[in-house]
Every structure is written in C-alpha cells, then in structure tokens.
Image (tube, rainbow, N blue to C red):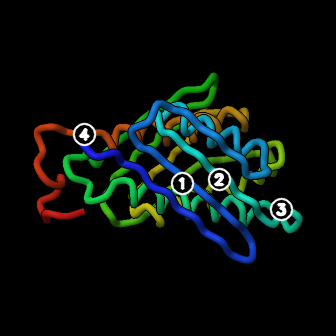
Amino acid sequence: MEARTAKITRCTKETEISVTLNLDGSGQYRISTGIGFFDHMLGGFARHGLFDLDLVCKGDLEVDSHHTIEDVGIVLGEAIREALGEKKAVRRYGSMMLPMDEALVLCAIDLSGRPYLCFDENYTVPKIGEMDTEMFHEFFYAVSYSAGMNLHIKQLNGTNNHHIAEATFKAFAKALDEATGYEPRVEGVWSTKGML
C-alpha cells in the first residue's frame, strides 16, 4: 500500500498553519499552537490514533483562541481527506467508547464524504488552561466538514472537564484509526455507489 500522508499549509491574516500527517504512523508528534492544553489534546490524538503529526500554528492569540483552534481543525480535516485519497479498501466506519476515570465518551465516524457533526458534551468551566471549552465544538465541526466525515461525539458520563476533553480527543483518535484502517475483503471503496 502507498504511504497515506498529506502536507497542508494555510496562511491567512489570522493564522499561519503547517500540518504534515501520516495515517499509518506510530504516534510520533511535534505540535505547537501557542495553546498548551490544545497541544496536549492534539498530542493525545496523535499518540492514541498512531498517527504521525507535525503541526505548527502561529495565530492571533492576542485576539483570542478562536481563529487558531478553528483553523487548525480546518487544516487537520483537509490533511485527513487528502491522506485518505480514494479511500480504497478502508473500513470507513469506526467507533470507540473511551473511559478516563469518571468520564466516558462515545465517538463514531463514517468517512462517507458527507460532512456532519453531532456534538453532545457539557463543560462546566469556560476554560481549561488557556483553551476556551466552547472551542471543542468548533474544532470538531471544522475537522468534520473539511474531512468530509460524519462525526458523532457524545459524553456519556463525567464531571471533571479535563477528563471529558481528554477522553473526547482519545476516542476520536481511536475511532478514526479504526475507520481509516484497511479491510482486505473489500475491493475499491466500501459503498454501493462505487465512491465515497
């Protein structure tokens, strides 16, 4: 199989982003967004999904974190879509119910090419570290629409906001790893339409 990698750059008046992604990596990562908790979450995503991720973002953090987090989601989604190519023999679907202490988060993915996000989580603090908790929704919305994936995220339990967030990123990683994996019994793409 060909290496499933992508390199994406995006420069606007608000952010400058460079992302290199290898879907068939070993969980190595180098991440710098200027938002410590976001870096921690993206590192967990790379490590637990076994994706190699090199991501650098210089954003207008003097304004707030919105542009940085949303734009990283856009570029990461584009990298996922590009690395998948024609999606030949990929499993397409992936899901994970992931516990972290008292938190339990469900993530389900369909790499259908039709973007949709269903996000059901409840954060009780406005920030974790320097990351606005309302930005978790915006990040996953951007990823799902740029990648063309149907993405469902649901908090089933949890009271500690850090645990909920970390379980979310790790569940997303594990579900995406499953969805991007190969099914050797399938020729072409896994769809009756013949394309995804």
Relative to 186, is 75 on the left or the right? right
Inspect the image, locate mark 1, and give the three-letter code of the amino acid beneath it: Phe
Q: CA–CA distance between discs 4 and 2? A: 29 Å
Q: Which of marks 2 and 3 is in front?
A: 3
Q: Do the residues labelled 1 and 2 touch (CB within 8 Å)?
A: yes
- Where does label 1 land, which residue? 119
- Where does label 4 land, which residue? 182
Q: CA–CA distance between discs 1 and 4? A: 27 Å
Q: CA–CA distance between discs 1 and 2? A: 9 Å
**Quick one: which residue is furthest to the bottom in this view?**
13
Helix, strand or loop at mark 2: helix
Sooner in the amino-acid sequence: mark 1 or mark 4: 1
Inspect the image, locate mark 3, and give the three-letter code of the amino acid beneath it: Leu
Label 1, residues with CA under 10 Å away: few <14, some 14-19, many ≥20? some
Relative to 44, is 113 on the left or the right? left
Sooner in the amino-acid sequence: mark 4 or mark 3: 3
Residue 20 percent across, percent down from the top left: 53, 51
- Where does label 3 land, which residue? 61
Residue at the (19%, 39%) spot, across then down: 183
Q: Which of marks 1 and 2 is in front?
A: 2
Of the numbered discs in the image, which one, if any, rests on residue 79?
A: none
Sooner in the amino-acid sequence: mark 4 or mark 2: 2
Q: Do the residues labelled 1 and 4 touch (CB within 8 Å)?
A: no
- Where does label 2 land, which residue? 136
**Quick one: which residue is furthest to the top in this view?**
101
